Image (spheres, helix red, strand yellow):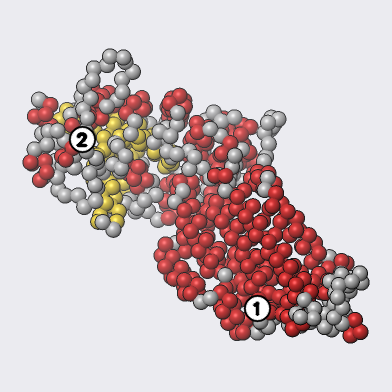
């Protein structure tokens, strides 16, 4: 069939990107985020030393040309540890949020779409919400044992109720839309309605919640590591570095300031990207 | 002519916190194949609910639905899916009834996928483009999204989606009331052409009397979930016997400079359909109401050949 010139496939994504570009702060955040991801992926190439290369003769050196961020009490290069640490902190951020998105998203959709299950699921979620998130995460890690994966699981599961709420609210409004009724009228099954009609139209709040929660997850993971529930030494998770450095905060403040700044930068980047996404996904703000 | 749809004493009640809402309360009618039955009434009289109950988008509370000689009041999910091929719906709001995240090709082609009526993507595209041509959508709009079209074109998409399964009955739930007047005429003409070509039967739900006059063979007037008057289109515009129908017809604006002003203005709001009592539902707003109207419910009676009215005093009011 001959296609005319004006016939074009253009995507929703292109439109979203066009609107995202207008928000300068969000673009900067995105660049910072991409930079961090690249550093994490190419850590062995970028890092001047290994994360566990000890040199007792060079312990506690202030930042200099050889060691731009100085060395810690065991003579390890802080910059290299920071670079390797981004792998842990970022993967915790992404995977923990991934876990919450999947569990919270699933529970939220089911609760909203099948009213009979709504009360059971959401009251259980309320029960978990009553427990402070950090305490819940600590319980999960202590029960499963402190390691990287359990840390992610703990951070992810402890924020599941929040995601379930956001998704449920969004799906509740989508399922009342006329196009869902139209889908039912043409004989679509529940699975089809959920996958093709409900999910694509209720995911905007979830995407935003996910980017914002990613910043929270990095902080939670850092906090848990700081308390000793996270990754074990010598692995250079940022929170763990912060925790280890606090003993020397008078002699070597850079040991805590630098990982702290790194956490701040990534959290800031994720927050502005989240804000930018929320704005460009909201069609009401479309000009 | 053979009947395609018969509805007997159909009831749909919703349980609300305040009590039982009688959305549709004992509606009975027959539609003949290839004809159009117009259902008229003001907002909240249950006309949309009626259409949705017939299509099983809401489950009925009581009554009987007979489609093509078969009782479909209670059907299994598999049977219902098969039925939906023959009974389709066109929605009121072409902005809300199309999934904003799907392209037109996918929206119109979705029924084909659901019923496995296309073996390949090419076959689907071919069929979709054919039906787009039938409803007057340019083929180049295949990859567009609903937000890129105006209301009239969107409604054509809704019609195409309903037509692609080649149904016999289409419930039209105020299909033109969200459109501009000039577009309304285009869409109505399209629907009438399609009816002629494909032998479709329409159940045309609307509050717009001029529209219903244009398209319907028979007209049913509803008030608070009940039918108050039923006759063929020409008859009802000539003689209205029920006080409510009289008021409705008199309210049609006439495009004349010095049109006689004999409009009957109804007082008050439509009364609540929750926890109704045995009375004439129109009595609180009726200028002819007598004590009896508040105590007993009138029955639908034939006052002229094929002309039914639900009013105690129909004869006195109209000097019959």
Q: Quadrant of the N terminus of chain A?
A: top right
List the residue tagged with mark 2. Answer: B267
Q: Chain of mark 2?
A: B
Residue B150's disc is: none
The one of A42 and A53 positioned closer to us in this rendering: A53
Residue B159 drawn at (x, y percent): 48, 35
Judged left or right of residue A218, residue A77 is right
> In this orientation, does residue B102 appear?
yes
Residue A207 drawn at (x, y percent): 61, 57
The one of A282 and A194 positioned closer to us in this rendering: A282
Q: Chain of mark 1?
A: A
Instruction: Please tell me in which quadrant of the rendered image residue B201 appears.
Output: top left
Marks 2/1: CA distance?
A: 69 Å
**Residue at point 44% right, 71% down?**
A123
Residue A224's disc is: 1
Residue A287 drawn at (x, y percent): 59, 39
Judge the density around disc 1: few (<14), some (14-19), many (≥20) Cα neighbours within 10 Å: many
């Amino acid at each position: 069939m001959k296609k005319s010139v004006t016939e074009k496939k253009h995507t929703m994504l292109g439109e979203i990107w066009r609107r995202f570009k207008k928000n300068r702060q969000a673009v900067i955040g995105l660049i910072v985020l991409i930079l961090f991801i690249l550093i994490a992926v190419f850590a062995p190439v970028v890092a001047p030393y290994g994360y566990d290369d000890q040199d007792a003769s060079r312990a506690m050196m202030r930042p200099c040309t050889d060691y731009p961020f100085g060395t810690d009490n065991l003579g390890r290069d802080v910059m290299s540890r920071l670079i390797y640490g981004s792998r842990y902190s970022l993967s915790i951020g992404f995977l923990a949020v991934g876990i919450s998105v999947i569990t919270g998203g699933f529970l939220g959709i089911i609760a909203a779409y099948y009213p009979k299950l709504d009360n059971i699921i959401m009251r259980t979620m309320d029960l978990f919400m009553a427990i402070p998130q950090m305490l819940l995460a600590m319980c999960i890690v202590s029960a499963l044992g402190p390691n990287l994966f359990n840390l992610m699981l703990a951070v992810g599961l402890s924020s599941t109720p929040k995601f379930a709420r956001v998704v449920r609210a969004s799906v509740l409004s989508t399922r009342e839309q006329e196009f869902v009724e139209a889908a039912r009228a043409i004989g679509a099954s529940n699975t089809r309605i959920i996958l093709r009609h409900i999910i694509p139209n209720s995911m905007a709040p979830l995407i935003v919640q996910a980017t914002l929660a990613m910043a929270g997850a990095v902080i939670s993971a850092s906090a848990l590591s700081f308390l000793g529930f996270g990754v074990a030494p010598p692995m250079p998770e940022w929170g763990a570095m912060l925790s280890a450095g606090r003993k020397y905060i008078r002699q070597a403040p850079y040991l805590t300031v630098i990982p702290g700044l790194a956490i701040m930068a990534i959290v800031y980047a994720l927050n502005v990207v989240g804000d930018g996404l929320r704005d460009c996904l909201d069609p009401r703000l479309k000009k | 002519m053979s009947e395609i749809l018969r509805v007997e004493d159909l009831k749909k009640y919703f349980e609300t916190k305040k009590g039982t809402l009688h959305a549709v309360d004992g509606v009975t009618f027959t539609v003949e194949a290839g004809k159009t039955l117009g259902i008229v009434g003001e907002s909240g009289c249950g006309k949309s609910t009626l259409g949705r109950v017939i299509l099983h988008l809401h489950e009925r509370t009581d009554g009987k639905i007979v489609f093509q000689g078969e009782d479909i009041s209670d059907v299994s999910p598999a049977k219902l899916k098969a039925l939906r091929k023959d009974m389709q719906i066109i929605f009121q709001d072409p902005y809300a009834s199309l999934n904003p995240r799907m392209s037109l090709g996918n929206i119109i082609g979705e029924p084909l996928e659901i019923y496995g009526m296309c073996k390949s993507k090419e076959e689907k595209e071919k069929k979709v483009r054919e039906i787009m041509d039938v409803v007057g959508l340019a083929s180049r709009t295949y990859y567009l999204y609903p937000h890129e079209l105006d209301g009239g074109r969107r409604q054509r998409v809704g019609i195409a989606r309903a037509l692609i399964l080649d149904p016999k009955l289409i419930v039209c739930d105020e299909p033109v009331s969200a459109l501009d007047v000039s577009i309304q005429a285009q869409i109505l003409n399209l629907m009438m052409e399609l009816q002629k070509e494909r032998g479709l039967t329409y159940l045309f739900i609307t509050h717009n009397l001029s529209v219903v006059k244009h398209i319907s063979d028979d007209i049913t007037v509803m008030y608070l979930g009940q039918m108050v008057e039923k006759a063929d289109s020409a008859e009802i515009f000539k003689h209205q016997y029920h006080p409510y129908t009289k008021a409705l017809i008199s309210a049609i604006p006439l495009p004349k400079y010095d049109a006689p002003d004999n409009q009957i203005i109804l007082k008050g709001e439509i009364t609540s359909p929750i926890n109704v009592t045995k009375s004439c539902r129109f009595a609180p707003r009726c200028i002819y109401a007598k004590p009896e109207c508040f105590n007993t419910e009138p029955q639908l009676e034939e006052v002229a050949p094929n002309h039914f009215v639900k009013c105690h005093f129909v004869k006195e009011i109209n000097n019959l």
